[in-house]
Image (tube, rainbow, N blue to C red):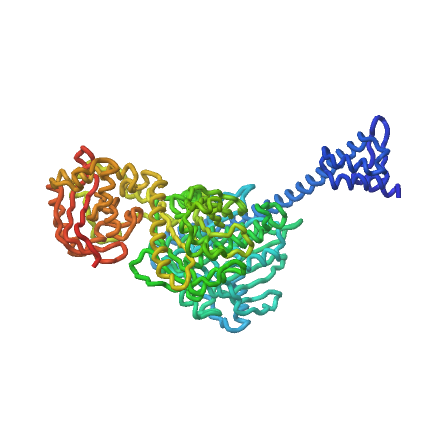
Amino acid sequence: MAMVVQHQYRENSIDKHLDAGKYVRYTSEQVEALERVYAECPKPSSLRRQQLIRECPILANIEPKQIKVWFQNRRCREKQRKEASRLQSVNRKLNAMNKLLMEENDRLQKQVSHLVCENGFMKHQLQSASAATTDGSCESAVTTPQHSLRDANNPAGLLSIAEETLAEFLSKATGTAVDWVQMPGMKPGPDSVGIFAISQSCSGVAARACGLVSLDPTKIVEILKDRPAWFRDCRSLEVFTMFPAGNGGTIELVYTQTYAPTTLAPARDFWTLRYTTSLDNGSLVVCERSLSGSGSGPHPAAVSQFSRAEMLPSGYLIRPCEGGGSIIHIVDHVNLEAWSVPEVLRPLYQSSKVVAQKMTIAALRYIRQIAQETSGEVVYGLGRQPAVLRTFSQRLSRGFQDAVNGFNDDGWSLMNCDETEDVIVSINSTKSLGALSSHSNSLPLLGGVLCAKASMLLRNVPPAVLVRFLREHRSEWADFNIDAYSAAALKTSPYTYPGMRPTKFTGGQIIMPLGHTIEHQEMLEVVRLEGHPLAQEDPFMSRDIHLLQICSGIDENAVGACSELVFAPIDEMFADDSPLLPSGFRIIPLEAKPDVLTTNQTLDLTSSLEVGPANGHSSTDASSSQNMRSVLTIAFQFPFETNMEDNIAAMARQYVRSVISSVQRVAMAISPSGLSPTVGPKLSASSPEALTLSQWICQSYSYHIGNQLLSSDHGSGDAMLKQLWQHQDAILCCSTKSLPVFIFANQAGLDMLETTLVALQDITLDKIFDESGRKTLFSELSKIMQQGFTYLPGGICMSAMGRHISYEQAIAWKVLAGEENAVHCLAFSFVNWSFV
């Protein structure tokens, strides 16, 4: 036994130590006792350790100094083992990453060689003697052979499609089938999640990612095939049929539905073939592509709300690494049929950056998140398990997506919807808080849920900055009473719903973080809104409101990333199955497009008015400065009791309009100045620019026409601006450039055009007049140039929502910049206007 013990602890480097010139040898019993003490009390200063040593008789004959040295050596051995294990793990990861980078370098070299060959071929064709021969040879060289028609209704035909999909996918993942360029803002490095690229020029839009993940290939395949778990835009994925491929793989026919990101375009669905197989080198592959034909899927009734999109060969290549982990390649290549959406949204459907952020990068980050949670690297608050918090985030996101889309098969229907309404109200009588979860405190007697939603265009406002402001300054846009109304539905006390006792909101909010994803792309948190009762009978009763909230996309450097703030009232008990009714904001950036005049006839005011010296900005400069556009989507959900839907609908519509107005004011305030020289200064009702412009408008009106636009006791400064803002006539100002756009309007002007201060800058002057009105305005331009003003006869104009407006008379005059003789803009006053 002594020999065994001696051999065992020599292997651990220490079984004895030299103390005052003598060896100290421990018996196996003493070593076991010391190990027990160390396991219970590893800290050297622990009083418990000293107590255990005193209580152990077998350690009584060992000097305290010798025991102290043994514990020190024991800690050193443990640190050495941990460090050695960590270094081995880091070394394995670096070797795998080095291998990945070498493969990427080889692929880039092949791509360069391919481009050089194409360049040489094109030069040769250009130097050919005959243009016809050149055209014919080019066509024969670049035209790819058409795929033979195959029967997709039998296994043999599907296997042929699957093998071809596999070959095309591998050529994109590791070859040169697509001209990949590095994703902007995603530089590879030691701390990077992976290597990301987007397509430069190909059919559809594509993105590619590759990285190292500390999970087994089979686990990764399982995670990625469960697309609704990590792809937030995926509504459902159903396997229609599945059969073995005969080579150890499986072929599946899959029907997938995805959410629409805004209220302005229909959602997309896919009918695809998915092929899962293994390669000779041990790699696993999951590749997928669209099948021709309708392929309506399991629920034909729901397909009418979707627009069929195409998935080109895409998928995942997972290769095992030596020592554990996997190298993964992801390719997403889709054609989202951008022609079927409004023109303003087409950049969103034609952007490879958006596909990369929503699908490719999201998939790799989700796998990395699961790997870190599995290894215990992630620590969450309030003692919640990572899977539980991830479920809360998914429920919030899915609930908001359902509210924005309002699918019929979920029970949603439009409620008294007029095409001219800026806020869409939908109702779901089949959905109640009792149906949202199995929570025992939910109220099954509720009549249903109502949703008010809207989408609009924002300019020159970074989405990340706006979402951060909305998160940190909730009192700037939210109504505490509305939050209290929704929160009251979660309580069982009868007096709390639907009526509420008067409460005062203190304006304070406390944000308590629960968890976040890697690189902090998404944060889950609990928000406590502080409120105090006004009634004297219950001064000590808490009126605080708790919200569960997710915030994502707050990184300003993330190109193509969507920014969201989604929240839902939650009971202070915060049970795992609490019912959630999410509301919130989504801001999606649109890629820049140059300002191109699409109208055949525009009002060239520059050539007819005395505008003074040019500002030196060319059209190219203007287009580059107006490159920050985004789509804002707002959706708020409200519970209601039976027979109360009309009252709640009116309240919801008014509240959402109030929120929109507040968000526009916030966006105007945080918008960088001087980004739009052709439009003029960004104006809001409380900005210094508005104060100055209101003075110029009134002074120029009095100078040209001889009357006062406002009452004689209007004063100056804020009082003048307030009267101008509340003036009964619609007053609008437009720029004097080659394409005159509106830069300011009072409240009546915004109501007449049915727009907002931000969206006002997207409306040109010629768009609001009919043909007769445009002719009249053209003929009166000379009079405006000579005498500075003119009276336009009554007529018909059009709002931004397409509704006709009649007006009794319109007055147009030049607005002079202060004491100078230069024209700043052109002002219009529409008298006695009304909708036809």
Give coordinates of residue 720: x percent, y percent.
22, 39
Determine the image quadrant of residue 278. Answer: bottom right
- Given residues 209 and 218, the one toward you in this image is 218
For the C terminus, the image quarter is bottom left
**Does residue 830 appear in the picture of this structure?**
yes
**Does residue 232 appear in the picture of this structure?**
no
- 757 left or right of 644? left
Give coordinates of residue 825: x percent, y percent.
21, 41
- Given residues 672 and 150, the one toward you in this image is 672
For the N terminus, the image quarter is top right
Q: Residue at x 44, y 65 (%)?
A: 430
Furthest residue in direction front, as rendered: 537
Count every numbered label the image shows and give the total: 0
Give coordinates of residue 529: x percent, y percent.
46, 45
Give coordinates of residue 226: x percent, y percent.
55, 59
Q: Residue at x 71, y 36 (%)?
A: 43
- 647 left or right of 364? left
- 622 left or right of 602? right
- Given residues 651 and 497, the one toward you in this image is 497
- 249 left or right of 362? right
